[in-house]
Amino acid sequence: MHDEAEDTVATDWPQILALYEILQRFGPNPMVSLNRAVAVAMVHGPAAGLDLITALETDNRTARHHSLLATRAHLLELLGEHGAAAAPTAKPPAAPPAPPNAAISAPAPTAWSPARDAPWRRRGGRERCPA
């Protein structure tokens, strides 16, 4: 649908919103919710989209995601709140959770050695890829 329109204004945002609402019903996830918030903003105004984004800011999967932060800033900019759009978020970045069994499955760290780990080595005056 985006590719059928000449520009953003000509995009059929109500149809895109309807499709995201169906997708949200059958395959809910935070990225679908974020994209739906953009469609809501384009149909009902930036404030309506920001209301949905505020709910996503409490979800650990999206709270510090660059897409959420950029979308939030863009919608604030559309509302004329340039200072709030440019301001960093108040919360410091949270460390991502460790995957299950990370301590078991991760190899022990080793020091990098240019003599051993270089992508190629010089032998006989010529560069040679390791075998």
Image (cartoon, rainbow, N blue to C red):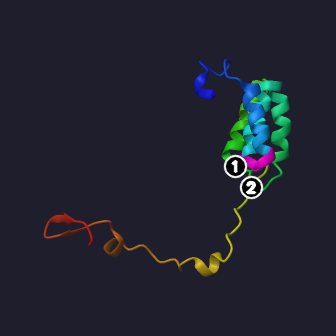
* Residue at image coords 75%, 50%: 27
Which residue lies at the image location 79% right of the left edge and 25% below the top edge? 43
Read off the residue under disc 2: 61
In the rendered image, the quadrant that contains the C terminus is bottom left
x, y percent for residue 113? 38, 74
User: Is any atom of residue 82 visible in this view?
Assistant: no
Q: Is residue 79 above or below residue 99?
A: above
Residue 30 magenta: yes
Q: Is residue 60 magenta?
A: no
Residue 128 seen in the figure = yes
Q: Secondary structure at mark 2?
A: loop
Q: Residues within 10 Å of mark 1 (few under 14, many from 20)?
A: few
Image coordinates for residue 2, horizontal then vertical, percent: 62, 28
- Proximity of marks 1 and 2: CB atoms separated by less than 8 Å: yes
Q: Amino acid at mark 2?
A: Arg
Screen quadrant of the N terminus: top right
Residue type at tag 1: His
The image quadrant that residue 114 belongs to is bottom left
Mark drawn on residue 65:
1
Magenta residue span: 25-31
Q: Tell me if residue 79 comes above or below residue 86 in the rendering.
A: above
In the rendered image, the vertical position of residue 118 relative to residue 79, given as above or below: below
Q: Quick one: 55 or 81, which is closer to the camera? A: 55
Q: Marks 1/2: CA distance?
A: 8 Å
Between 110 and 60, which is closer to the camera in this rendering? 60
